């Protein structure tokens, strides 16, 4: 069976903005405000060198979110267009959700010419200090290494290539729908898994507000799971999400006052 198709990269060149406008919009259900940087370029970094390997479809990592905590990757909106990063790139999970474009280079035997893939960070490739970084410890510092599902790897290289030289660059994420907030916890402990984030893709700060509280800072639990200790039951919930490029989006009244643990709600989205 052929591997599922992955999102093709979209390259957009826009002239510099002459003015920055700030818009505020309201709806009858929930509202959102967004602040953004003055550039709308889809590229966030230049091409850099790394290496990439793959894991087989029978590996358990193809259905669970790994170190980023996304759970079922299909339900979370990531599918098989995902990647695990080596320790020197993973940033202790702060980079979870970011998007990279990869292309195979330097090996005409195995590379598929003119191709590239776009993947989201969902997992971590742990170092193996039983090997040196150049003698089997592919994810050991200071190596920059990507671990891909074979379905993604075979978009840019023949599977026999195994450990391939690649080039990568950070790009903006494009997502369908809004940011998703999956609420879990018990009593006054509330955790929110934040997924399907466009733009920079990774989240650096989160605030939550009940209909009877002010804004409360949430702490990073692990990956993109954020938590707060507060009694927010029987209150509509609003979220303020800030990404690594200093953009902020506020989604008001995303969860109604009768929300329950285990539910997922969709808010507003970053502009891309």
Image: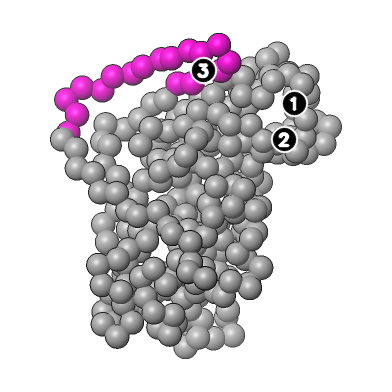
For label 1, the crowd category at 10 Å Cα-Cα, with few meaning under 14, some 14 to 19 and many 20 or more, is some
Question: In front: 90, or 258?
Answer: 258
Question: In front: 58, or 48?
Answer: 58
Location of residue 152 in the rendering, given as x and y in whole percent from the top left corner: 45, 66
Please state, as top left, top right, bottom left or bottom right, where the C terminus lies in the image.
Answer: top left
| In the image: residue 210, left or right of residue 148 | right
The residue that label 1 is drawn on is 259
**Secondary element at tag 1:** loop
Q: Which quarter of the figure has residue 232?
A: top right
Image vertical order of residue 224 relative to residue 40, above or below: below
Residue 257 seen in render: yes
- Asked if labels 3 and 2 touch by Cβ distance under 8 angstroms, the answer is no
Q: Which mark is residue 31?
A: 3
Please state the extent of the stretch shown in magenta in the rendering. 16-33
Question: In front: 213, or 33?
Answer: 33
**Secondary element at tag 2:** loop
| In the image: residue 219, left or right of residue 55 | right
């Amino acid at each position: 069976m052929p591997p599922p198709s992955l999102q093709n990269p979209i390259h957009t060149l826009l002239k510099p903005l002459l003015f920055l406008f700030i818009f505020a919009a309201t709806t009858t259900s929930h509202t959102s405000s967004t602040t953004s940087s003055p550039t709308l370029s889809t590229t966030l970094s230049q091409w850099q060198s790394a290496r990439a390997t793959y894991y087989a479809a029978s590996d358990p990592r193809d259905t669970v979110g790994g170190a980023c905590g996304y759970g079922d990757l299909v339900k979370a909106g990531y599918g098989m267009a995902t990647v695990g990063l080596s320790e020197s790139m993973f940033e202790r999970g702060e980079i979870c959700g970011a998007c990279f474009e990869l292309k195979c280079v330097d090996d005409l035997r195995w590379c598929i010419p003119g191709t590239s893939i776009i993947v989201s960070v969902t997992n971590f490739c742990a170092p193996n200090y039983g090997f040196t970084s150049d003698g089997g410890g592919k994810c050991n510092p200071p190596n920059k290494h990507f671990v891909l599902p074979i379905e993604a790897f075979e978009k840019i290289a023949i599977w026999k290539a195994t450990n391939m030289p690649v080039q990568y660059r950070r790009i903006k994420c494009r997502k369908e729908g809004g940011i998703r907030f999956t609420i879990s916890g018990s009593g006054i402990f509330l955790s929110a898994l934040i997924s399907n984030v466009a733009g920079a893709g990774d989240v650096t700060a989160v605030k939550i507000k009940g209909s009877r509280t002010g804004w409360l800072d949430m702490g990073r639990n692990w990956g993109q799971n954020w938590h707060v200790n507060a009694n927010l039951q029987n209150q509509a919930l609003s979220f303020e999400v800030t990404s690594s490029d200093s953009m902020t989006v506020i989604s008001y009244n995303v969860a109604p006052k009768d929300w329950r643990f285990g539910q997922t709600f969709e808010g507003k989205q970053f502009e891309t």
